[in-house]
Image (cartoon, rainbow, N blue to C red):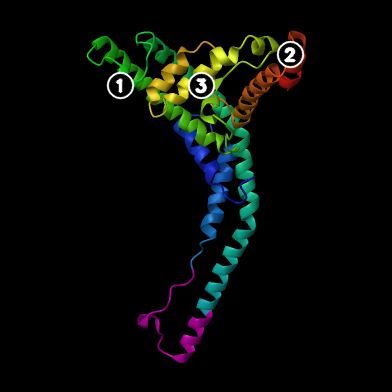
């Protein structure tokens, strides 16, 4: 997928190590071998001679030229052969990291859960309106709760950033509202849920509130931890796509409902629209 570029895989490994996650010996070995060909690919040529390098006799000069030519040919050969190994070694390293990423992301979940729990505790102490300019900063209870919430939110942002570095080794999250779906899962659509207007009454308002808090990361996290209609769960890129597709099926079901004239027609149309 990434050709000879191992940059994203290297970032994923760095993020995993930063989080104290296990990196397999196979990945370490592939990284070490890749480092060998990178070094070999820059095998130095002999430095250009200076006046001090001129030998005393023509015969010695001839030998010096031949020695330097041999050294240059050797360096060129090293570079060329290293280049031959570039693609297969990059593919091995990228493939190993790609296979490890889902497990790494799953390993982040306990820490993620702990931070969400801490944030949820502080959310109960704060007012309903989470916009920063609406908070009563003169109230010590509110300011203290906010300070603790800010700490948890900051740690969550760092954790999610590392999750993103790992996920990019598989592919981009992509899609609409991918930042939300990377950490939150909504229920899969059902006929009953569509007909009961759960998107209109629950999911839609929550998503709009979350979007409206753009640039206010603490408030955004507080908004999510207060929501009962979603599950906060880290996702791999594939799962992000699945969550986005599930939300699109909610929208498809709503469109089918609006085009139906009777309850029976609506049930049939919605069922067809939301079918995976």
Q: Nearer the viewer, residue 34 or 140?
A: 140
52 in the magenta segment: yes
135 in the magenta segment: no
Position in image of residue 3 (x %, y %) = 62, 50
Q: Can the viewer see residue 212?
A: yes
Mark 3 or mark 2, which is nearer to you? 2
Q: Nearer the viewer, residue 97 or 36?
A: 97
Mark-to-mark CA distance, 2 and 1 = 46 Å
Residue ranking furthest to the bottom: 58
Q: Secondary structure at mark 2?
A: loop
Q: Nearer the viewer, residue 240 or 213?
A: 213
Mark 2 or mark 1, which is nearer to you? 2
Q: In the image, 158: left or right of 272?
A: left
Mark-to-mark CA distance, 3 and 2 = 29 Å
Q: Which residue is mark 1?
A: 133
Q: Nearer the viewer, residue 144 or 190?
A: 190
Which residue is at 74% across, 10% downward?
262
Position in image of residue 152 (x %, y %) = 38, 20
Position in image of residue 81 (x %, y %) = 62, 62
Sequence order check: which comes first, mark 3 or mark 2? 3
Residue ranking furthest to the front: 261
Q: In the image, 135: left or right of 256?
A: left
Q: Which residue is mark 3?
A: 207
Q: Which residue is mark 2?
A: 261
Above-or-below relation of 153 to 94: above
Which residue is at 38% across, 80% downward?
50
Screen quadrant of the C terminus: top right
Give the magenta-colored segment's residue range: 45-66
Labels 2 and 1 touching (C-beta < 8 A): no
């Amino acid at each position: 997928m990434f050709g000879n570029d191992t940059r994203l895989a290297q970032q994923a490994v760095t993020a995993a190590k930063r989080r104290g996650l296990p990196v397999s010996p196979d990945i370490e070995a592939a990284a070490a071998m890749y480092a060998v060909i990178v070094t070999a690919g820059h095998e130095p040529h002999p430095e250009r001679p200076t006046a001090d390098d001129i030998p005393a006799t023509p015969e010695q000069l001839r030998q010096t030229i031949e020695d330097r030519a041999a050294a240059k040919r050797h360096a060129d050969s090293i570079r060329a052969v290293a280049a031959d190994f570039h693609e297969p070694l990059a593919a091995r390293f990228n493939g190993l990291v790609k296979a490890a990423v889902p497990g790494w992301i799953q390993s982040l979940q306990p820490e993620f859960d702990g931070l969400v729990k801490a944030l949820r505790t502080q959310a109960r102490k704060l007012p309903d309106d989470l916009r920063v300019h609406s908070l009563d900063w003169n109230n010590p209870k509110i300011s203290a709760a906010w300070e603790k919430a800010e700490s948890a939110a900051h740690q969550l942002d760092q954790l999610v950033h590392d999750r993103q570095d790992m996920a990019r080794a598989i592919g981009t999250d992509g899609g609409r509202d991918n930042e939300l779906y990377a950490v939150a899962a909504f229920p899969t659509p059902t006929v009953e849920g569509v007909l009961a207007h759960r998107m209109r009454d629950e999911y839609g308002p929550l998503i709009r509130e979350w979007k409206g808090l753009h640039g206010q990361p603490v408030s955004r996290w507080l908004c999510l931890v207060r929501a009962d209609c979603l599950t906060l769960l880290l996702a791999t890129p594939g799962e992000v796509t699945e969550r986005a597709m599930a939300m699109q099926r909610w929208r498809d079901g709503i469109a089918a409902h609006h085009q139906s004239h009777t309850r029976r027609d609506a049930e049939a149309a919605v069922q067809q629209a939301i079918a995976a």
